[in-house]
Image (tube, grey):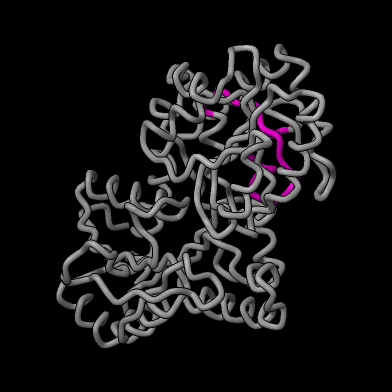
């Protein structure tokens, strides 16, 4: 097996400073691989404030979800980049037009291709009112990934589901968390004062996109029921997206949108909360759940793939059957501070065992194995 420096080309349609789980993971991967001595070049859409340079391509919005940007480049352009960089391994992280062009170019050059599956995009078509495309999207995703040497998936649940759907060459590539950044020590009294909260009041937190695929209506409905009996509770949603203006209508009911947060600002929001609520059932992993655990927050979530592998019911939080009422779980933990503390401490211990180093060891070994098998 090759153990020396690798020349890796990463193709992705999302990348820092964009804020989402895929961009976070890929940004950290590139940083870590470079620190290990590997040469990593990235082909991605050019962001609005960037000047033209090699590897940056045109961006255009996804027609039914304009907040998501896709990249466009010809296979010939990508071919030229890969040859110019003397790339040895190609990692395609997104399945859009840019990813497909990269697949064509890499196969023409005879380069080993690894893909990673991050998002259940086939489900989005049903959520956004285009159910006729759901099955076609699934067929496309299967065709795309099965044309490569290896597909990396973030959780066992996702791996099992894709295997049942006919995806081949699957391998789990888990995630990690920075437990120094996401840490209960960053609890910020000023954040709570600005919200009018005392130490005894309850701050319920959600972090993620404000979009249909995150299943936010059950969370908001449950909180509104809880607040009738507990008016000192508050729900804060950290993130942005197409539903923000709709959610802003509930401000007078103590539901607040804090907007996009990153770095230590995000860490302080986690640490200043008392309970993390995550109603999404469309996750392949759910990085934010791990960040909340590192911040010693008990979790309320649905028993859905990705999330259910991170949260043991009664040990790190409460997992509910899909579509059940979240308000009962909120009420249970609202009235039991000792239980919240116990669950939060257990989650923190779990997070401390989830290192990014182990995650990137798997990624590095995958590249090496595929190059050796060329």
Q: Nearer the viewer, residue 91 or 261?
A: 261
Q: Is residue 280 magenta?
A: no
Q: Which residues are magenta?
A: 294-312
Q: Nearer the viewer, residue 256 or 373?
A: 256
In the rendered image, the quadrant that contains the N terminus is: bottom left
- Residue at image location 48% in from the left, 70% down from the top: 66
| Vertical relation: 184 (above or below) 161 | above
| Prevailing SS of the magenta stretch | loop
| Vertical relation: 127 (above or below) 108 | above
Q: Position of residue 356 (x, y in %)?
A: 41, 39
Q: Nearer the viewer, residue 145 or 21?
A: 21
- Residue at image location 69% in from the left, 43% down from the top: 308
User: Is residue 247 toward the left or the right of residue 35 in the image?
Assistant: right
Tell me where residue 282 sits by quadrant: bottom right
| Vertical relation: 32 (above or below) 65 | above
User: Is residue 251 toward the left or the right of residue 111 in the image?
Assistant: right
In the rendered image, the quadrant that contains the C terminus is: bottom left
| Vertical relation: 354 (above or below) 50 | above
Q: Position of residue 359 (x, y in %)?
A: 44, 44
In this view, the residue farthest toward the front is 252
- Residue at image location 77% in from the left, 44% down from the top: 221
- Residue at image location 49% in from the left, 39% down from the top: 258
Q: Nearer the viewer, residue 36 or 4?
A: 36
């Amino acid at each position: 097996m090759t153990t020396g420096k690798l020349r890796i080309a990463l193709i992705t349609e999302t990348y820092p400073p964009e804020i989402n789980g895929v961009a976070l993971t890929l940004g950290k991967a590139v940083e870590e691989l470079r620190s290990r001595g590997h040469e990593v070049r990235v082909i991605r859409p050019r962001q609005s404030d960037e000047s033209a340079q090699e590897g940056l391509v045109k961006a255009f919005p996804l027609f039914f979800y304009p907040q998501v940007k896709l990249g466009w480049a010809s296979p010939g352009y990508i071919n030229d980049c890969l040859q110019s960089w003397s790339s040895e391994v190609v990692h395609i992280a997104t399945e859009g037009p840019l990813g497909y062009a990269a697949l064509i170019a890499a196969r023409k050059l005879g380069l080993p291709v690894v893909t990673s599956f991050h998002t259940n995009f086939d489900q989005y078509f049903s959520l956004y009112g285009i159910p006729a495309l759901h099955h076609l999207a699934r067929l496309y995703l299967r065709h795309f990934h099965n044309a490569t040497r290896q597909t990396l998936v973030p959780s066992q649940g996702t791996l099992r589901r894709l295997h049942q759907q006919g995806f081949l060459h699957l391998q789990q590539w888990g995630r990690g968390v920075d437990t120094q950044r996401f840490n209960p020590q960053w609890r910020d009294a000023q954040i709570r004062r600005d919200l009018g909260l005392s130490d005894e009041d309850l701050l319920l937190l959600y972090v993620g996109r404000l979009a249909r695929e995150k299943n936010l209506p059950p969370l908001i409905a449950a909180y509104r029921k809880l607040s009738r009996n507990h008016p000192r509770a508050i729900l804060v949603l950290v993130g942005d997206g197409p539903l923000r203006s709709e959610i802003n209508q509930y401000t007078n009911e103590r539901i607040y949108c804090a907007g996009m947060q990153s770095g230590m600002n995000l860490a302080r929001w986690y640490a200043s909360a008392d309970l993390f609520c995550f109603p999404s059932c469309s996750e392949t992993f759910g990085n934010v759940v791990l960040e909340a655990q590192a911040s010693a927050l008990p979790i309320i979530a649905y028993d859905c793939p990705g999330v259910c592998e991170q949260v043991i019911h009664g040990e790190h939080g409460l997992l509910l059957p899909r579509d059940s009422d979240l308000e009962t779980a909120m009420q249970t933990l609202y009235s039991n501070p000792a239980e919240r503390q116990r669950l939060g401490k257990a989650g923190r211990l779990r997070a401390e065992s989830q290192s990014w180093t182990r995650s990137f060891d798997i990624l590095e070994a995958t590249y090496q194995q595929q190059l050796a098998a060329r």
